Amino acid sequence: MKFPELGKDKYLEAALHDEIDYCRIVRKIIRGRRFYLQLVMKGVPPQKRLIGAV
């Protein structure tokens, strides 16, 4: 399984910082794959920032 580097995506890094509540197996065909693991995290999701915002 491939993940983007955490240093490049600040939103992904903040989202994966919380504890995992549970995992869901999703059956859907996208790009030839049939099953996906969906993580449900505890806590409040981080807010996305606008590009160029301080």
Image (cartoon, rainbow, N blue to C red):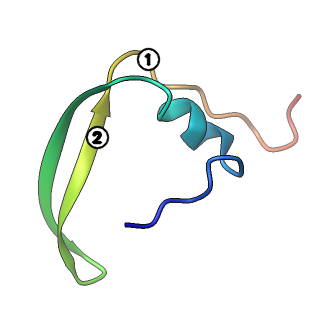
Asked if marks 1 and 2 touch (Cβ < 8 Å), the reply is no
Q: Is 52 situated left or right of 13 in this image?
A: right
Say which residue appears at 28% left-offset and 40% top-offset: 39
Q: Is 10 situated left or right of 54 in this image?
A: left
The residue pinned by badge 2 equals 39
Label 2's element?
Answer: strand
Q: Residues within 10 Å of mark 2 (few under 14, many from 20)?
A: few
Whole-percent x, y for residue 32 in the image: 24, 84
Amino acid bearing label 1: Val
Query: Farthest residue in the bottom direction?
Result: 32
In the figure, residue 13 lies in which quadrant? top right
Whole-percent x, y for residue 15 in the image: 50, 33
Whole-percent x, y for residue 48 in the image: 62, 34
The residue pinned by badge 1 equals 44
Say if 45 sits above or below 34 in the image. above
Q: Is 24 situated left or right of 18 in this image?
A: left
Q: In the picture, which quadrant includes the N terminus?
A: bottom left
Lower position in the chain sequence, tag 1 or tag 2: 2
Say if 17 sits above or below 26 in the image. above
Q: Out of 48 and 10, give the one closest to the viewer.
A: 10
Label 1's element?
Answer: loop
Amino acid bearing label 2: Leu
Q: In the picture, which quadrant includes the C terminus?
A: top right
